[in-house]
Amino acid sequence: MDDDLAPAPGTGRRAPQPDLVLDSETFPSWLREHKVEIPDPVPGYVQRPELEQRCSPTGRELTVLQAPGGFGKTALLAACCRRLRDADVPVAWLELGDADDPAALAMYLALSFERAGIATFDAVTDVAAPAGERESDTQAQYRANLLIRAIRHVEAPCILALDEVEHLRNPEAVALLNAFLEAAPRQLSIALAFRERPPGLDIATRLLDGRGGTLTVEDLRFSRADVGRFFGSRLSRRELTSIADYSAGWPIALTIHRNALGAGAPPSDPVTDDAAAAWIDARLLRGLDDDDREFLLDISLFDWIDPELIDEATGRASSRRRIRTMAPLAGLLRTAGGANAAQLHPLIRDHCAERRFRENPQRYRAVHAAIARGLSRRDHVVEALRHAAEAGDPELLADVAASADPVALWIGRGFDALQLMDNYLTADLVAAHPRLALVRCLVRALSGDMEGARRVYQAAAPGDSFRNADVRSMDRNHLLILGILHVLGCSPLAHFSELVDVGSALVAEPDLDPMVRGMLRQGMCLSLTDMAEFDRATTEAEYARADLGHHTQYLSPHLDLQLGIAAMAQGHTADASGRYQAALALAREAHLGDTGTVMFGEILAAELELERNVSARPLASPTVSTRLLSESGASHDIYAANVGVAAELAIASGAPDRALATVLSARDFARSTERTALATLLSAMRVSILVIAGRVEDARRAWHGDDLPGRDDACLDFAIYRWREVEAMACARLRLLIACADFKAARDLANRLDIATASRRLVRTRMRGLALSMRLESLAGCVDHAAAHLRTYLGLFTRADYARPLARERTVAVPLLGHVAETCTEETVATAARDIGDALAAAASPFAPTMPTLTARELDVLKRLEHHADGQIARDLNLTYDRVRYQVRRLFAKLGARSRLDAVHRARALGILPEPPL
């Protein structure tokens, strides 16, 4: 007999069946894909055109199917969705589950729309944030916001069908779904199928105001005519009437009964209790012999049908053949997308699992334990842990968890898998197994709980418990964890040198595992980038890529981001942009398991774009909170770039108070989580914003109150501070000294900064310093020196097109650019001056809508306005008296001033004039 054929219901003959084999090695990806594939047609499905038309999600915002299990909600909704998909309507399908938290829900929503042809990142880079969009505070919100933008970009109608919504029990996940439904664009129609509405799911408004429709039990019951078509011509009229009456039109009851008839049961065998349990017991389990019944109760404990694993865990043989030849299972195995794998109908699976536990709890635990061991041997650690927990065996749970390599799991499956693993670990297990303590430490660090991570690490620090055969491996894991704590905790740079030295010694060991060596090299690359040792950082990154081999699918984007940061700092803007885009391309392909990398790439790309432009455009990607960065495992560079971009955009829109609030909020976070280096950078950034806002005295107090360096040259100590810290502190100090008219100290600091940055090829920082030096000399009245600094800047600009530093000093830069464009004999510099000057003249002010553009002559008059009469100004500048009066009237008009003193005060508030020295 052909093994590929199983008995057709009621005929005794064999009918073609799908190959229900699932290679256990592909399980995690298959199970994920299964949730987002429209289920295949069930055998014997009866088409009901009028009901399908009412169920079709098109034409209304919301369609709800609510009925107990087994009423065919999934089959009906899937039939509608398949028909729409065949008509080229994008249809996203998602089967929800008990374990779906906000992160999982957002991930599966994104995957479901990708299956429908709407990728989260397709063609939305030019779409600014919609009005009212909230700042993303979690990765789930970030994913959902990106998805909403992608859907909004699609003009044609599209469908989202959510099945088994009753399993969505996590309150935060329900809140995320509510927010998604509320923000859904008009072209998106949504269908929900559930037994009971999850608490908190807000759909009443749409149903009450006519934007939605509901199908209930009465709509889904089979009529007598439907029952007749379901059974064909095999029943007499009396049998049909009897079955229709006692089944009450319940589809799964009819399916079980039809299968029972195929096995030779009497045509009518009324059951007084029409609940699911009674039907399954009476018409399914009772129709099986004892061995098949035991087999069905056993396989109900499996997440998917894997005959090899079933044989191994149950001690049976030929599970594949048995499943194919069990006629009562026809129509009760669910497949999706034509996959060669299946699951039991959830109603059957849940009932049989509960019955297995009630009848034989020892067998229940033994099978779960055997499944856990089998999955663990196949490296499906997270799935194995769930079964070990069901087995109620702490030792097995510890063995499965301890057998996993946390770093390999993190690289291979992403952070979510590591977090799921940690959820199964009790305090006793962590205390007894040092490797598991490292898991918890890593999870807490990557989740932003630095205090908790340090506490766990200190408790599990190398000591007597680590003096065993695995000590060298444990030492390497400890080094990785320690490096992560320093990197994510934004520790002072002085801590990095020793780690880099130890790492350099370890990677030279010939017997070191390549994956560990690659991870160490990646950490060294990040540390060396912070230390402004870019050549060494680049070398370590390329070695890391070679060491990691196939694992680079997850880690390559991080390496590219680091190389991009190094290129950006050195002014290699095209290379930096290419690195960021390469990282984003890889991260977007794998974003379902690693949204954080996408977020980081978007932030760094936005920082680069902003530094290269004179105008400040709204971001195309959703704004994110510091808390979200923390939860995503952000490094110092990401925090600095994110806050810097947000503050710059706020200042550019004329809202320095908002910029200040952003920086202070981030600094409070940095201090509360002991991120000392980040707190230092943000304190310096605060001083800069206060000076720009004209609050010079507040800025002076902030510098001393925030314990920033007391000596100006200490701001340039690259042995203590990261290059971004040096940049922020030096520029803030320069601004403050200029605003206080302490030009001598400002010149000394500016010269030291130029020398230090030139020697380290920190082109971005050098160009920022040169722009401030230009401002310094212009306000000090040394126009020739100001022009000289500008020419040096423009010489760098021909290779590193950073225009933003000049946009920040627009009032001073515009007239000087015109002067250089007319007088410079070097054509490339003169061309750059004209191009930037034209762009600045055309662009809105980078700081406030009312910022005036003053000519060089107007600036000369303004500087003398407070202490000199018009006649004296005329003699000093070799102008006529009437010409000076004309310039004064123009200054009043541009500054909105009514008097000479008012003009001077307004110019100081705008940063055009420095504050007077104390």
Image (spheres, grey):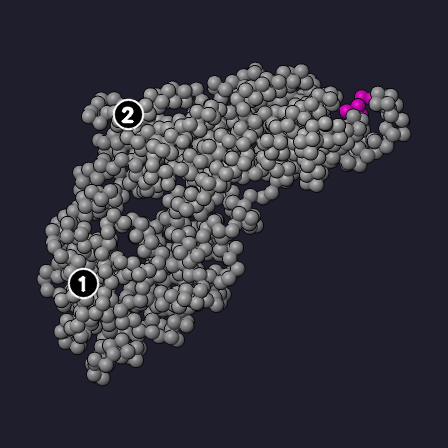
Q: Which of marks 2 and 1 is nearer the N terminus?
A: 1
Q: State the SS at label 2.
A: loop
Quadrant of residue 305 within the rendered picture = bottom left
Q: Is residue 865 magenta?
A: yes
Check residue 324 in the rendering and tell me which mark sits there, or answer none: 1
What's under tag 1, amino acid-wise?
Answer: Arg
**Residue labelled with disc 2:** 510
Give the magenta part as a residue range: 862-868
- Residue 348 in picture, x, y percent from top left: 23, 61
Disc 2 residue crowd, few under 14, some 14–19, many 20+, Cα 10 Å: few
Q: Does the magenta stretch include residue 287?
A: no
Residue drawn at (26%, 41%) of the image: 424
Quadrant of residue 290 within the rendered picture = bottom left
- Quadrant location of the N terminus? bottom left
Q: In this view, does 72 lie to the left or right of 496?
A: left
- Quadrant location of the C terminus? top right
What's under tag 2, amino acid-wise?
Answer: Pro
